[in-house]
Image: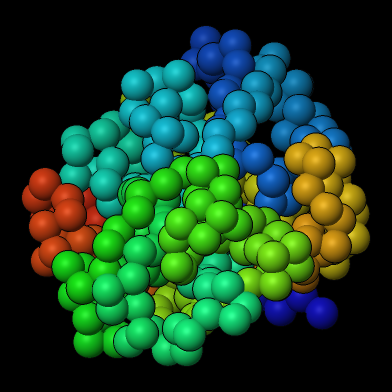
């Protein structure tokens, strides 16, 4: 059953779009939405929900797929994408680099869709056992944050491991070949590693820290079209409510769009959450902890204040 607060949040988001009409002179010809191929986005695309919502305004929807978050945010920064969804770490690196981005909404995760995995028969049994090991992760991705947080929990420093920054496809190959001893990765790659390679989970996100996902928009786009951002949030909130009770449809759409094994996708979908919410004080505090973690280790060029780039939006206003 969908929590009542999620339904109320979605209703407020929808109301925001309704009460903020877009004038014909103040609209783009298209909105370019960046996604990491998979998740519930293939189902949203199949359902044409956004297309139907924006067509009356004379606005086309263009979907652009990325392998993971950092290149998606770079596209938003340079203005080739207007709006997109990423994990917790890419916005930190982007903000530290001066990117023109804004947080516009969040998805609170239960921490089940990302983990550090090792081969089934690996002698690595605890996070502390990662000391001296070669560990794969996507640089600047949410898996990067999971790895850093996991080392902290185990009392290890970044220099205690041999970092292997690899994109998901390259990390998959490295893990299968045994050229890395552990891998910090998100779904559906995580589910595939579990099902196809018998990978053993060393720690999920929830065992180490509180993760969230974020809808991000280009700064100029937010400032010029705030009512469209509200309408985008409302549309994804509505689809999130639908997705919570239609896991099989979400899984089938993702499997068809990506070619990923349906059983792996079902595992991913069944442990995902889709509720779109505003960035409240709790979410901002959690994200600031991520930023502080990377700043402390010198992994970003300067400390950042997350709240500086949060879009000040209240549903229904």
Quadrant assignment for the N terminus: bottom right
For image coordinates 67% across by 56% down, the residue present is 188
Residue 166 in the image: state x and y as whole percent: 42, 46
Judge left or right: residue 194 versus residue 267.
left
Number of disc labels: 0
With respect to residue 55, does 182 lie above or below?
Answer: below
For image coordinates 60% across by 57% down, the residue present is 176
With respect to residue 223, does 288 lie above or below?
Answer: below
Of the pair 119 and 305, the residue shown nearer to us: 119
For image coordinates 67% across by 23% down, the residue present is 61
For image coordinates 44% across by 60% down, the residue present is 180
Q: Tell me if residue 265 can be seen.
A: yes
Residue 119 in the image: state x and y as whole percent: 58, 73
Q: Tell me if residue 230 can be seen.
A: no
Query: Which color mode does the image show?
Result: rainbow
Residue 66 in the image: state x and y as whole percent: 55, 34
Residue 317 in the image: state x and y as whole percent: 49, 51
Judge left or right: residue 291 versus residue 104.
left
Of the pair 203 and 173, the residue shown nearer to us: 173
Question: Within the image, what quadrant is residue 43 found in?
Answer: top right
Question: Within the image, what quadrant is residue 5 found in?
Answer: bottom right
């Amino acid at each position: 059953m969908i929590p009542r607060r999620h339904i109320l949040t979605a209703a407020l988001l929808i109301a925001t779009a309704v009460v903020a009409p877009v004038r014909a002179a103040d609209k783009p010809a298209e909105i370019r939405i960046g996604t990491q191929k998979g998740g519930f986005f293939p189902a949203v695309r199949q359902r044409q929900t956004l297309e139907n919502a924006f067509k009356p305004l004379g606005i086309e929807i263009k979907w652009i797929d990325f392998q993971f978050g950092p290149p998606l945010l770079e596209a938003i920064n340079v203005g080739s994408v207007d709006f997109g969804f990423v994990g917790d770490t890419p916005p930190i690196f982007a903000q530290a680099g001066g990117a023109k981005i804004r947080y516009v909404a969040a998805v609170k995760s239960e921490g089940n869709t990302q983990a550090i995995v090792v081969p089934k028969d690996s002698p690595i049994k605890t996070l502390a056992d990662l000391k001296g090991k070669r560990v794969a992760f996507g640089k600047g991705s949410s898996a990067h944050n999971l790895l850093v947080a996991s080392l902290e929990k185990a009392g290890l420093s970044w220099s205690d491991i041999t970092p292997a920054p690899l994109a998901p496809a390259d990390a998959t190959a490295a893990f299968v070949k045994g050229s890395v001893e552990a891998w910090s990765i998100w779904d559906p790659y995580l589910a595939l590693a579990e099902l196809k390679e018998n990978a053993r989970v060393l720690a999920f996100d929830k065992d180490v820290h509180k993760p969230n996902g974020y809808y991000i928009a280009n700064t100029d786009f937010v400032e010029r079209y705030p009512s469209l951002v509200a309408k985008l949030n409302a549309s994804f909130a509505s689809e999130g409510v639908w997705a919570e009770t239609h896991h099989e449809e979400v899984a089938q759409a993702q499997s068809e769009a990506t070619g990923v094994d349906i059983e792996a996708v079902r595992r991913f979908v069944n442990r995902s959450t889709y509720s779109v919410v505003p960035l409240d004080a709790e979410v901002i505090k959690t994200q600031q902890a991520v930023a502080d973690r990377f700043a402390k280790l010198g992994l970003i060029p300067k400390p950042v204040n997350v709240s500086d780039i949060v879009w000040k939006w209240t549903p229904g206003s």
